[in-house]
Amino acid sequence: MNTRTQRELSPFQQRWHSIIFEADTPAGKVFDIILLIVILISVAIVMMESVTGFKVKYDHLFRVLEWVFTIIFTIEYIFRVWCSYRPKAYVGSFYGLIDLLCILPTYVEFFFGGAHFLLTIRILRLMRIFRIFKLVPFLNESKQLALALEHSKRKIMVFLFFILLLTVVLGSIMYVIESDYNSGFTSIPVSVYWAVVTLTTVGYGDIAPVTPIGQAFSALIMIMGYAIIAVPTGIVTVEMSRLRNEEDVDQRICPHCMREGHDANADYCKYCGSKL
């Protein structure tokens, strides 16, 4: 087991580690639920502050509460670093970066200005709710989706490259058809933009063909759009089915290196060697 960079924690630090990082314990669950409530309130205040009427009437109260929440989250972040077995691993982990980004905007706003409404990033911390309430089916399905996207990314990238080439070709053809009769198709880039909007079946309607050939061609592109949308869905669905059959989805997070993605039957972390 690799413990060279793992530090020893005092009994007091270990007690806080179980409270802060482990939602399995009653104290840990209560801590995270209270934290989620505080996060929801802080995000609601930032959203209300963007409303002119509320800001004029409660500006001073909003500022005081914002600093109260920032101090609370700062203390919590310091505690997480202090009672972590591997502080650097926590700071660089996904949740560690989110925790840091949740407190930085207030300080950036105080010293430089212009970052106040970035505080709504705190809503990302609500993803901990999956761990807190042990919603295993949701955890399992979300992990399957993430792994399916990871395994099929090369196929999807090839597909997107093909779509990019296709939109350039379709846009160029439409430019040739419509440019002499339609003031909307002023250039090939504009025509490519129209092809993207039409192929994805978004249909803004800001540019539309007027010639019979152009209208027939656009109808063909719209029909193609439905088939194209189904392709990446099918790729990801096949991967999710394969993962479900292999049962290689694991929702555990190593308490030492803060990483996930272990094999379902693993007893030790494959990244740091610590006991899971």
Image (cartoon, helix red, strand yellow):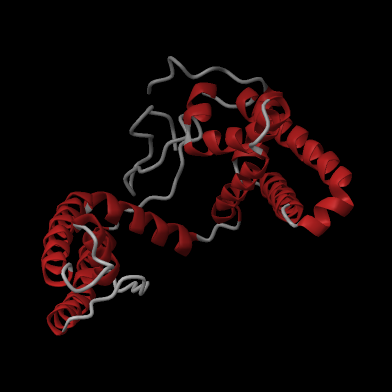
Residue at 44%, 38% (x, y): give it: 276
Percent coordinates x, y for residue 217 in the rendering: 14, 78
Q: Measured along the vertical axis of the image, is residue 168 above or below residue 31?
A: below
* Residue at figure coordinates x 28%, y 56% from the top left: 148
Residue furthest top as drawn: 4
Q: Is residue 119 above or below residue 15?
A: below
> Would residue 8 appear left or right of 266 to someone viewing this image?
right
Query: Whole-percent x and y of residue 234?
Result: 21, 68
Q: Can residue 43 be seen in the rendering of this structure?
A: yes
| Residue 4 in the figure: left or right of residue 248 | right
Along the line of sight, which residue is nearer the eye, 158 or 97? Answer: 158
> Considering depth in this image, is 250 or 43 the residue closer to the camera?
43
Q: Quadrant of residue 115?
A: top right
Q: Is residue 273 above or below residue 69?
A: above
Q: Quadrant of the N terminus?
A: top left
Say left or right for 185 vs 11.
left
- Residue 106 at x, y = what percent? 70, 34
Q: Who's the residue at 71% across and 46% down the image?
A: 35
